[in-house]
Structure formats: C-alpha cells, structure tokens
Image (cartoon, rainbow, N blue to C red):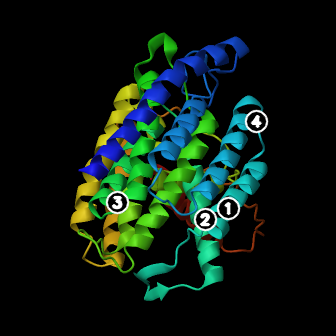
Amino acid sequence: MTNCLIITLGLLLALGISIYLVPVVIRLVKALRLFDHPNERSSALRPIPTLGGIAIFLSFVFAVTISTYGNELPGLIYIFAALLLMFVVGLKDDIVDLPPWKKLVAEMIAAGCIIIFAKIRFTSLHGFFGIEEISLLPSIIITTFFIIVIINAFNLMDGIDGLAAGLSILYASIFGFWFLVNDHLDYAILSFTLVGSIAGFFYFNVFGGENKIFMGDTGSLVLGTILSVIVIQFNEFNINPISHFPVKSAPAVAFGILNYPLIDTLRVFIIRVLHKKSPFTPDKNHLHHRLLVLGFSHRKASFTIILTNMLFIIPVFALHDIGIIWLMAFIILVSGILFTLPAYFIKKKNLIVYNDPHQQLLTISLKRKTMKYNDSENIFEREKFTSKILKIQMLLQKLNIW
C-alpha cells in the first residue's frame, strides 16, 4: 500500500507540473515564433508550436527527484546527465536543424553515461542463439547500439498527434506495473512518473485545439533515452528472477512490447536504403502516414496503432515461456502481416500517388545496366537478362509494400 501511494503521488506530481508547464511553454514558443510549419514531409496542417518536450523533461526530472527520496535508485544522477544531454541536443535541433551525425555522436555519449557511469547495460542474451552471459566489450557494443536504435525509433515515430506520447504512456505503464508487482520500487517510480509527465503533454497535443503543441526532438529524444534504460533493466531483472512474475524470453517480450517503433523504423530504413537514400532522410513511408492516406484522422490513426500495439502485447506475455526464438518468430510473422495491411488497402483502393516522392509504395526504380549485343549473339541472352531485372524489381516491390 505504501509503495502504491508513493508511485501515485509521483505520477500526480509529474502530471500536475506537466499540465502547468505546457501552457507556459506554448506562450513562450508563440512569443519566439518557434513553430512547426507545414511542408511536404510534415503532417501538420497549420503552424504549431513545438518544444513540448521541455514540459516533459522538467516535470519528469523534478517529480523523480522528489519521489525517489528515501528510495535509492543507483546511477540516477548519470541517467539525468544522459537525459540532459539529449534534452539540449533536441532543443537545438528543434530551433536550428542539426545534421544527423552530430545527433548520433550525442546519442553515443549519452549511451556512455548510462553504460559506464550508471552501470546499466545488457549482461545476458537469455539463451538467444544459445548465448547466456556476455562479456564486457560485447555488452557495451550491444547496449550502445540498442540505446541508439530506441532513441531514433521514438524520434522517427513522432509524426502525428498523440502517437509518440500515447505509445510511451502505454510502454511505461506496462513496464512500471511489472516493476511494481515484482518489488522493483525504484524503477516503478521512474516508469509511472514518466507516465504522468507525458500525460500532461498528451492532453494538449491531442485535445489542445488552439493550444496544441508538438513535443519535437526535445521530447522524443528524452523519451527514447528513458525508455531504453527501463527496457534494459527489465531484461536484467529477468536473468535470475526472484519475483512474483518472472518473464522468460525477456528480450523477445521487450521486442514485442516495443513492436511498433522498432519494426516501423526497420521498415522505413530498408525502403530508404533500397532507394539509395540516407536512412535518416525524412519521408512519408511510416505506417501512420499510410493510415492518413487511407483517410484516417491524426487522432484515429494514433489510437488505432496504440490499441493494436496494446492488444498485441497480450499474446506476447502469454507466450513468454515458449522459447525466445519461437516467440521472436511469432512477433516478426504477425507484425509483418499487420504492417502490410495498410499498403495492401492503399493499392486496392487505388490511392497511390505515383509522382509523390515521399509516398514510395510501388516498385523501386532500377536503372537498367546497358548491355551491348552483337548481331551474332543469341537473343536468348537478352531475354534472360530482362527476365532477371523483372524478378529483382518484383522482389523489391514486395519489400517496399511491407
């Protein structure tokens, strides 16, 4: 009962501060005219204030500091240091665009703070491919890669109203509840305080009307960093669990929970690379963009994705003891089908805009290699080459539709 009271107070404190700060940030942003203007790659229909991540960051840090008093959370100061770095980088990127490589360097430094100083890292793969304990160097490499992937996944996911915030509330609530029932009070406080911080922003982002605000990179980079820490600890606490609800195949379960941002990021990166573009080049190939093409409103698209992800988590937890490889196969198979459906209906309803460079839903344009044939050469070779090109194009089309 005491633990629940502490967590509830932390959540309410974060919520109250967030609700108070968001209008303040909106007034400040409007005074400085820091808007997200509509463009060919933005889903905004009018200039919207950004920098909502300021309220999320400040309310989270303040509420966690107060709520963890007397409840030691090892490495908290270094977690805050990583968050502060990502907050400053996100703030600068929202005001003046930063090149991707600078953000990547900052993400690596933040990961270093978490891994080296806070001592939060993966130490086991839970038997994945027969690998249990992993040594220090592979652990650092894997954890750094994971943190960078999570940060960028949440950064890319922030494309329509309520999506990044709503999914973050869902993920933090699930992990927070697991931490609570398994007596990891420190991380339960961290998780539910994050829920409160985001919830205040979520209201204005989705239902704000004239007071609508976006979180910007200021918020998405911070959210990705916090949730990467939470996921790592969820995996670590399940290595040799002494708890009420131990989770087998914890890495696969975590992957299933974070299903949408991870698979959608992988999918758009594949499409961009196949189009010979940088993986960090913005476009409109995300699943939420495809739902907008189908006529969904921002709110409807976000709630559809959030509800689908929430329902998907139920069988993931239910099947946690079937083995990590089988569970990963189940997640990838079902996710592949779900992620294909919007593109299938777009094609079926003839909603494809062929000349839209950001709606890359069809065959990737391949430049044919020029081949010279002498009159004496068999025409069969020419037909064989053409057939090979067509087969490659069909394969790439299937990948692109996914």
- Residue 66 position (above or below residue 22): below
Between circles 2 and 4, the one closer to the viewer is 2
Disc 2: CA contacts within 10 A as few (<14), some (14-19) or many (>=20): many
Dot 2 or dot 3, earlier in sequence = 2
Judging by the rendered image, the residue that carries numbered circle 4 is 97
Disc 1: CA contacts within 10 A as few (<14), some (14-19) or many (>=20): many
Quarter where residue 156 is shown = top right
| Viewer can see residue 310 | yes
Residue at 45% x, 50% y: name it.
190
Amino acid carrying label 4: it is Asp
Judging by the rendered image, the residue that carries numbered circle 3 is 179
Judging by the rendered image, the residue that carries numbered circle 2 is 118
Between circles 1 and 4, the one closer to the viewer is 1
Dot 2 or dot 1, earlier in sequence = 1
Residue at 23% x, 56% y: name it.
314
Image coords of residue 399 (percent x, y): 49, 57
Rendered image: mark on residue 113: 1
Q: Gap between marks 1 and 3, in whole Å? A: 23 Å
